[in-house]
Image (cartoon, rainbow, N blue to C red):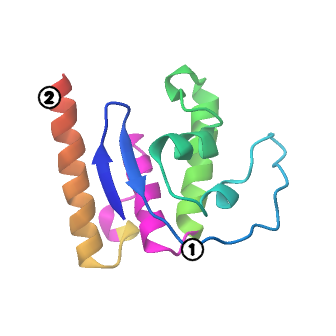
Amino acid sequence: MTGRLTPVGIRCSAVEPETSLTDHRRAPNGLTPPHARLRRAMDFDQLLVSFFGTDAIADLAPGQLADGIDRLRVQFGLERDGGRRFALWCLAYMLGAAPDLDVAFKDPADREAARDFMDTVDREIEDDG
């Protein structure tokens, strides 16, 4: 799992071997269920589309943003793959909705990686501001 800041946001890569997805049905809201898309390489923009239906989250109504964050939190709680879990946590952090590190990560190395991510994002925000 790697992460790097880009002009658009953060790119998180967490790739797992190709698997066939048997359930391609759409959720009632018309979106493909997040778990179906998380099988591929994770990318910040793809994560936004998976949980919010768009990569332009600044244009979302507050209720749509809250609904997407709820879906993100559920998927984070269900996710068992460490790389994908970290990518989901990164997105939640960028949205101000990440759980505390001691709750999110059991492994001290994962907590330290999350702290490094937080420091990097915070520095980027300060440099842009």
Q: Residues within 10 Å of mark 2 (few under 14, many from 20)?
A: few
- Image location (x, y in percent) of residue 74: 60, 59
Q: Quadrant of residue 122?
A: top left
Task: Left or right? Give the position of 126 relative to 16.
Answer: left
Residue 96, x across and y down, in percent: 39, 42
Q: Position of residue 100 (x, y in %)?
A: 34, 60
Where residue 11 appears, as percent x and y from the top left, is 38, 47
With 37 as the anchor, is 7 left or right in this view?
Answer: left
Segment colored magenta: 79-102
Rendered-image quadrant of the N terminus: bottom left
Q: CA distance from mark 1 to mark 2?
A: 37 Å
Q: Is residue 38 positioned above or below 31 on the image?
A: below
Q: Residue at left 24%, top 42%?
A: 121
Q: Which residue is mark 1?
A: 17
Question: What SS does tag 1 mark?
Answer: loop
Q: Which residue is mark 2?
A: 127
Which residue is depicted at the point 84% across and 45% down? 28
Q: Is residue 84 magenta?
A: yes
Q: Relative to 125, say whether 28 is above or below.
A: below
User: Which residue type does callout 1 highlight?
Assistant: Pro
- Under mark 2, the amino acid is Asp
Work out whether mark 1 precedes mark 2 in sequence or the reverse, and give the earlier one: 1
**Residue 75 visible from this viewpoint:** yes
User: Along the line of sight, which residue is nearer the eye, 14 or 66?
Assistant: 14
**Residue 95 image-quadrant placement:** top left
Q: Split into 4 quadrants, where in the image is the C terminus?
A: top left
Label drawn at residue 111: none
Between circles 1 and 2, the one closer to the viewer is 1
Does the segment drawn in magenta span residue 121?
A: no
Q: Residue at x 15, y 39 (%)?
A: 123
